[in-house]
Amino acid sequence: MKILIYVIIIFTTLLWVTNNSFASEEKPKLIINEVMPNPVGDDSKYEWIEIKNTSSESVNLNQWKFNGVALPDLEINSNEFIILTRDKSSFELSNKMVDFSFNLVNSGATLVLLENDTSIEHKFSYVQSIEGKSFELLTGACSTIAINNHTHTMGLENTSCDVVQNPTVTPLPTVIYFTTYNYRDLIISALSPYPSQGSEWVEISNTSGSEINLNGWIIKDESNKSFKIPELILNSNAKTRIFPTTISLNNDGDTINLYDPQNKLIDSYKYGKVTKDQVVSENDKHQISGDEEDIVEEKILIDVPEVGSINTESDNKSIYEILKKPIFYKVEDYIGI
């Protein structure tokens, strides 16, 4: 009898250990199957996330959180896909879609899907995106996240590990926005040098096709005083106002320069004397000739102070035809034509 009791105790212990072992290795019922962080067109409309139910039973989304935010009340059948969209009215496909608040960073991120009751999670990490191409979890034994070779497989089975010879493995997210910035990727589009209330500000616009992290960018005035911009992600074709506390925008005129983190001059803005609450915006433009690496764009207000006397033959010329100024030369070096 004692032997039987011992056998039962040992069997029960083994069963408990085995069940806990399997529980700790339990796979999530829902997985992030594919994401489109950099679609063709407006990111705020066309970004999407595909979630798949890999279990043998139906699952409700409201039992899960995406990056800490509760998902909506929606049932997903076994092996079914659901597409989280930012604006489902922008899609014409018949896939099961639901609008959800999110923003996918083009340069890389880690997305987390967490089950509320069990704390079982699924992580999906991707790196620098390519416009119009999704990141997908390849099917098969490789468990690899790769950039789709064509466009995407929204609502369809993902590409097989066997098809992709050398998949782009993304085990960890990166934060690479650019390593080399081009002329006028960012521009100084407006200034407020003399506000009656609040602080002076510099408006910066992103003219590139990708978002840019402004961390480490530098604003300098004509006296070479500088302000380093803290981390701030600026979306494509978006604007932001920077309040450069360590420099002063002179009311009598100044030149404000914008440098990338590699200390490369990206844009320069020259303005004349301003009045209280006057906002200096990008009006007339003139591209100065010179070495392409050093080209800056000079922006001059229409109401700049007169520079010397100009003969009547020049009256029909624009201010840019009348004045030519080498980069960073002093006022005395202006050449009148």
Image (cartoon, grey):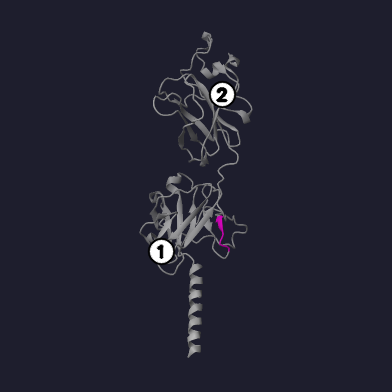
Q: Which residue is mark 1?
A: 117
For residue 154, say whether it is visible.
Answer: no
| Residue at image location 40% in from the left, 58% down from the top | 96
Q: Residue 41: x, y in percent?
A: 47, 44
For residue 322, say whether it is visible.
Answer: yes
Whichever of callouts 1 and 2 sits on the residue coming sooner in the sequence is: 1
**Label 1, residues with CA under 10 Å away: few <14, some 14-19, many ≥20:** few
Q: Residue furthest front?
A: 2
* Amino acid residing under circle 1: Asp
What's the CA distance linking mark 1 and mark 2?
Answer: 60 Å
| Residue at image location 59% in from the left, 59% down from the top | 164
SS at mark 1 in the image:
loop
Given residues 329 and 315, the one toward you in this image is 329
Q: Which stretch is magenta?
A: 142-146
* Amino acid residing under circle 2: Ser
With respect to residue 306, does 157 lie above or below? below
Q: Residue 158: x, y in percent?
A: 52, 60
Q: Residue furthest right?
A: 291
Q: Which residue is mark 2?
A: 223
